[in-house]
Image: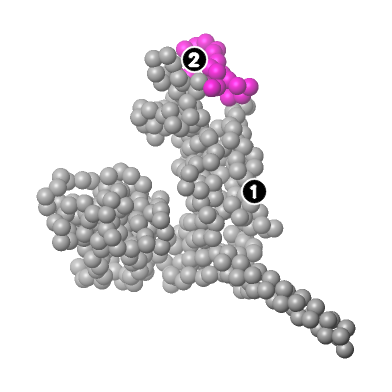
Amino acid sequence: MKSVRTFSAAMLVAWVITFTNGVAIAQEAVAARDVISTLDGRTVENVIVAFDPQGQLKLADGSSIAAADVLGITRKVEVATNRQLPIIVHLAQGGSLFANSAQLENEQVTLNTSFGTLQLPIEAVRAIVFKPSALTEAATANIATPSNQFDIIWAEAPDGLQAASGLIRSIANGKVSGEFGGEERSVALPKVVAYIAADLGMKTPAGLALLQLADGSQFRALCGGLADQRFTVTLPGGGRAEIPWNSVASIAFTSDRLVWLSDLQPIEDLQEPLVTNPRPTRMDRSVDGNPLTLRTSAQRDPLKFEKGIGVHAYSRLVYRNNLGFDRLTALVGIDNETQGFGDCVFIVRGDGIELWSQRVRAQDDPVPVDIDISNINELSLIVEPGAQLDLADHADWCNARLLKTK
């Protein structure tokens, strides 16, 4: 009997360990769930196991979602708040990659990134910044609006940062080489702060998705799909990469069933402040020209948005809805740049009738907007001052978009 009791105890211990490990694995799976938003307004939490952009997004429970209905994917992947890699590569179609090293040879840029080696045609690259902390205001402005005739390098000189224009042929073997002033010259790479490629006017391909990676990189690419925990993308210009799925933090897709309001021209753009100076409406920026940010009580760092509209109360933007869109969605709030000040009322009207309104203060969490605009011809987005006049009323319509869900 003693041996039986001993065996039974051993079995019980093994069962407890197995059960405990099973619970831990199940809890880990739940914690690792992906959040999938769809065009019809649904939010699905599950684990994505495979994805074919032309077919289905397959989930761990055996269900699937049509890829054409997926608007975005947010994953439980922590994004680095402090840049870990020393080089910033700005892309011609917007966004940036972080890299350990960058070379240019034979019209190809080779990057050593957190997810492996990536090769891009030079047309896909706007700038390579080797020393971000040394950038001056002039160099930063040059990156934003590159020349359409010359490549430019910014390099350290005894009297400060200096720019030289020409044709850069290579960045390799510890130097930047090219033709400057009709002569072949080279500059030691340790002295180079930034290389800015000539703007060749490459057209933006249709169907680009916006990807956010764990290392902080954010860029647009064509999605090739997910298989065996590797996510394949093709960057504009032809650069192809396989990214570990656990490095992908979020994906925002484009669709002909969606249009961002910041990409449309309003038929009316009225700004009438009460006591402050007039400020123009900003597309995809706050009214002060900064990236759109909203604070939230759910996390320490503010939420950041690439798409949206920044205005100052009083503001009225009017859009035509003549292409069959049936929903307006957004996330609204006072931009984090006000440092806790601001109080205003967001209003949406359709054909002159109020459809939705909400008072929002800087201390409040962002407020979601989801409105049926079926049969609405003219849509008005209004921000009125709150109790503090219009002081610090930096209002953001983040991710404001029109959808076709029917």
Q: Nearer the viewer, residue 341 or 172?
A: 341
Identified at 61% across, 67% down, the residue is 28
Q: Earlier in the sequence, mark 2 or mark 1?
A: 2
Q: Which residues are magenta?
A: 164-190
Q: Residue 272 magenta-drawn?
A: no
Q: Residues within 10 Å of mark 2 (few under 14, many from 20)?
A: some
Q: Quadrant of residue 144?
A: top left
Horizontal and vertical percent position of residue 377 = 28, 66
Amino acid type indicated by mark 1: Glu
Report if residue 60 is visible in the image.
Answer: no
Query: What is the quadrant of the N terminus in the image?
Result: bottom right
Q: Does 136 appear above or below 326?
A: above
For label 1, the SS is strand
At 62% across and 45% down in the image, what residue appears?
Answer: 115
How far from the left and from the top, in percent, is residue 81? Answer: 47, 47
* Marking on residue 242: 1
Please tell me how crowded label 1 is: few (under 14), some (14-19), or many (20+) other residues with Cα within 10 Å.
some
Residue hosting label 2: 180
